[in-house]
Amino acid sequence: MSDPVIISGGGPAGLMLAHELGLWGIDTIVLERHTAREGGRSVGQALNTTAAELLDQRGLLDGLWEHTAPSQGTHFSLLWLDSAPLEGRHLPALLLGQEYLERELEQRAVKGGADLLSGRELVGYEQDDAGVTVTVRHGGVESRLRGSYLVGADGEDSRVRELAGIRFPGSSQANCGLVADVESDFAALEEVHRGARFCPAGGLYSSVPVEPGVTRVITAEFDTELPGPSVPPTARELRASVERLNERPFPDVPVRWIRRYGGPSRVAERFQDERVFLVGDAAHTFYPLAGLRINLCLQDAVNLGWKLAGDLLGWAPPDLLDTYTAERRPAAVRAASATDTQLALIHPVRRVAPVRELVTTLLRFPDVNRYLLELSTGVDVSYAHEDAPGPLGRRLPHVELATPGGPSSVARLQHGGRGLLLDLSAGRGAARAVAAPWSDRVEVAVAQATADIAAEAVLLRPDGHVAWLGALGDPALVDALRQWFGARG
């Protein structure tokens, strides 16, 4: 047995990675410096389409539906997009408090064998050819842990990234935001204080109900630097910010908690240093718009998990781990650029007003709307070359399937976290025989052909991206199995 994978950080990215590794029987230790979760104190509320589908792909939405609410829709810089091109083919965006997501991920990770150590702060590490030795501080006492790999999931101020000497450059206009839970029924607020909106005064405002009698309020203003940690935010500051943005007073109601957020977009220059990896906000951070930030965190974890497992179980091709940075860093750069573009359409108001009017006009063109819709939902992420045919490298439509065992879906068929060879040939092919040598890492499912998937068969990687599609007799299928799942078992 190999040493466990050590994950520094018990947020969504770290917990999702622990869950993914647990599906393969890989031991993990999750180090979390806090002793208790800060019940809901996160700006994160939106799950865009891809984030929702990633959770559904692992059966993780089952325990979360009761805490979700319909999203107002998908937007690009608070210019609302027509979601019709994705309807019936992908899940809609949802509102879900990050505290519920973290709680579910923690329970599932621990159930899968993860060892969650709270109140532990990583202070140093050393790595060699066989693994990583981590120094941890707990209650003023330092100890050492041995792991096969170390993953930094410890946020935008990542200690792991700092110790690895990985630069974290950033650039974007200055911004300062406030997020707070206030004791006010959402429906009782004036209409101007409900929902998400671009504010003519220059900035962004949003509010969503989080529980009966409690509303989460989020503001963002620009050309304003974040004050230092010695200047705590106040309820008065929140009311003043809302009034500047909405040009209407906000009720003087009790504030349960409040914090600031903001800063430039940043992407780490590399996501790996030998046996050390970065995921989530440790690898990239930007303004939280349209759920792209949590989407990237979850995608990092799902992308890296099966690749680490393949290496530790001995079947990974030699360059499989290298594809993590090669795939995820460009996706992070693209998401950060998309976010900065949206911020550039918000401030300064007088300068951007005619540009917003032009973009609004352009959104009437279906191709423009679809392009920005797929960009904002993460559906456009592809790991194939630009000239690759059809859905190669992308995620399949999130559609229902008819299987011999009854109704199912692509998502339900991937709950186990393995690769999937989906046979849509009505039994004419020999999918099980072709995939038999990889049976410990690739599952086979037979389903009726569907117009939503234009192929006789599809090979999906464990993260849900298409590795191959075509006819079962195509020799390229065996090449794809070898490329992503190694030599025959």
Image (cartoon, grey):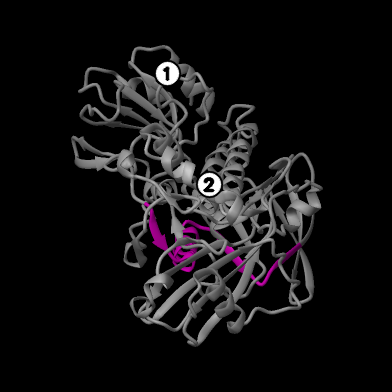
Q: How far from the left and from the top, in percent, is residue 290?
A: 48, 53
Magenta-highlighted residues:
93-122
Q: Nearer the viewer, residue 395 or 239?
A: 239
Residue 32 vertical position relative to residue 404 in the rendered view, above or below:
below
Q: How far from the left and from the top, in percent, is residue 57?
A: 38, 46
Locate residue 323 relative to residue 399 in the image: left or right.
right
Label 1 sits on what residue type? Leu
Locate residue 222 relative to residue 257 in the image: left or right.
right
Q: Nearer the viewer, residue 346 or 310?
A: 346
| Residue carrying label 2 | 354
> Which dot marks residue 78?
none
Mark-to-mark CA distance, 2 and 1:
51 Å
Residue 216 vertical position relative to residue 77 in the rendered view, above or below:
below
Residue 370 vertical position relative to residue 473 in the rendered view, above or below:
below
Q: Residue at x 74, y 51 (%)?
A: 161
Task: Please tell me whether residue 47 belongs to the stretch shown in magenta.
Answer: no
| Residue carrying label 1 | 477
Task: Please tell me whether residue 97 belongs to the stretch shown in magenta.
Answer: yes
Of the residues tagged 2 and 1, which is closer to the observer? 2
Mark closer to the chain start, 2 or 1 = 2
Q: What SS does tag 1 mark?
A: helix
